[in-house]
Amino acid sequence: QLQLVESGGGLVQAGGSLSLSCAASGRTFMIYTMGWFRQAPGKEREFVAAIRWSGGSTSYAESVKGRFTISRDNAKNTVYLQMNSLKPEDTAVYFCAAARVIATMSESQGYNYWGQGTQVTVSS
């Protein structure tokens, strides 16, 4: 199995920055892609960003392009999400996810493992 633990959420003012981390443990050799998703109150979970574990290609939701950056440290089995120019609409619980094999990085159904989530709140 694979375990994912997120950290780094918190409260920030609009225009500020936060950095999230997701540490994977267990059968990390299974990882093919890691992604970040978020869910705001009363809304469905939505894709934020993802990265291929080998090669490092990335994908972003249109709403975060140019503001968020996903990266990974294979040696530490950790994926990061740097969030800049935060907006109140970015407020949500952010989830880390890992997929063994996935064709489309933005599809949540393709991810096999999920973290517990970390709250990000952006005040106006």
Image (cartoon, rainbow, N blue to C red):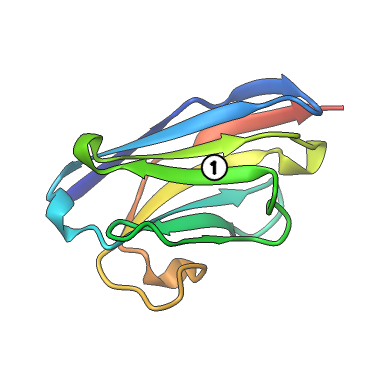
> For this view, does 73 lie left or right of residue 47?
left
x, y percent for residue 21: 42, 33
Left of 109 or right of it: where is 9?
right
> At x 13% / y 55%, what residue is drawn?
29
Q: Residue furthest bottom?
A: 103
Figure check: 26 above or below 122: below
Q: Quadrant of the C terminus?
A: top right
Is residue 58 visible in this depiction of the protein? Answer: yes
Which x, y percent locates residue 86?
74, 35
**Where residue 62 appears, x then y in whole percent?**
71, 61
Q: Place residue 82 in its image quadrant.
A: top right
Q: Secondary structure at mark 1?
A: strand
The answer, for residue 1, to whether it is visible in the render is: no
- Number of numbered markers: 1
Identify whether 3 is placed above or below 86: below
Which residue: 43% across, 44% down? 71
In depth, the one of 113 and 85 nearer the eye is: 85
Tell me which amino acid carries mark 1.
Tyr
Please give the residue where the numbered disc 1 appears in the rendered image: 94
Q: Position of residue 98 (x, y in %)?
A: 33, 56
Residue in view at x 35 percent, y 73 percent: 102
Q: Looking at this rendering, what residue extends furthest in the right direction?
A: 124
